[in-house]
Image (cartoon, rainbow, N blue to C red):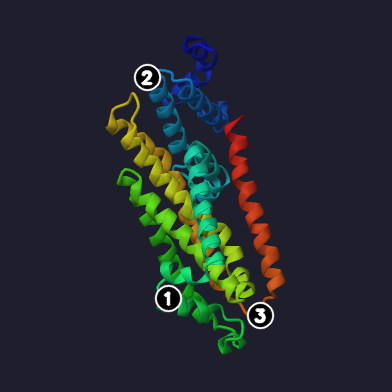
Amino acid sequence: MKQTQFISIRQAHWQKLEAFFNGEASAEKLDLPALLRAVTHDLAVAKSRGYSPAIIDRLNTLITSAQAHMYRPKQRIGYQLIRFLRLGFPLSVQNLKQACVINHILFYGFALLAAGLVAYQPQMIYSFVDNAQLRTMEHMYNPDANWRQIERASSGDFQMFGFYIFNNIKIAFQTFAGGLLLGVGALFYLLFNGFYFGALSAHMVNIGYQSTFFSFVITHGAFELTAIVLSAAAGTHIGYSLLNPGRLSRHIAVKQAALRAFPVLLGAFVFLVIAAFIEAFWSSSQALPQGVKYAVGTLCWIGVAIYFCRGLKYATR
């Protein structure tokens, strides 16, 4: 389809949004979420077909304005957060679909590579993980450790909740901020964490601690690992715009990339808070049977996958 035909067919939707933002139409007459999904799809089509920067800039402006209107603090922040998590976050991930897919492949690909190396040559773990840190991890997941006979006090759970939030967000921010170094920093942190997780997982299997290790990480890992990968995707998306601004100026390309990446980063931070809560109050519990942890963890992974598939459904409407 030629650009003129595309504009002729689709610009009625754009004009509705423009009339709304110019004060010429009321919100009651518009289905703003549906229009946002339609214009987001139009932007993806325009980019894939190489239409003019003016069209792409026009659509980007409409999407940014619509998102700002939908998520503005006109209602209680709790309502806005729920609305963002229900629609804005999965839709923003779909807007960065290519970066998210590539970063997932890299993270889990390097994790599998590290796991294979350590499984084949167990002594290689000492090349990847500091010996003192490894001893600490072994003590933590030792199924026969004496401390496992005592359930941690609730005050200790809250302390660990704060620790996990700080640690998780620090990792995610490092990964995202690394994207400003032309994407190299984001890839470094992403691959490092993937390699570390894979190597450590294989080591726990080698020494027979797999039951305590995987039952601990399976539930919160659905949110934590996904958030780390999404943070990297947001960072590399900005880094790529620095390297390849296309027909836009570098300043405008980076600005637009940042506007698309920020909702992904915000959603990732929410996922990290959820992961920290689960890790502190659920994963570390000695009273819960491992079978229950595996069942709930599996449901969490399936739920996260379905959640982001909803974003694909919204984007293609």
Tell me the tag on residue 133.
Answer: 1
Residue found at x 35% / y 41%:
239
> Above or below — where is 52 with respect to 283?
above
Quarter of the picture holding the N terminus? top right
Q: Give the Cα separation between the discs numbered 3 and 2.
A: 60 Å
Q: Secondary structure at mark 3?
A: loop
Residue found at x 67% / y 60%:
298
Tell me the tag on residue 54.
Answer: 2
> Above or below — where is 169 with respect to 163?
above
> Above or below — where is 128 with respect to 36?
below
Viewer-proximal residue, 50 or 198?
198
Viewer-proximal residue, 21 or 223?
223
Residue type for callout 3: Ala
**Mark toward the viewer: 1 or 2:** 1
Residue type for callout 2: Ala
In x, y percent, where is residue 104?
52, 48
Q: Secondary structure at mark 1?
A: helix
Specify whether residue 73 is in view: no
Mark 1 or mark 2, earlier in chain: 2
Residue found at x 38% / y 61%:
170
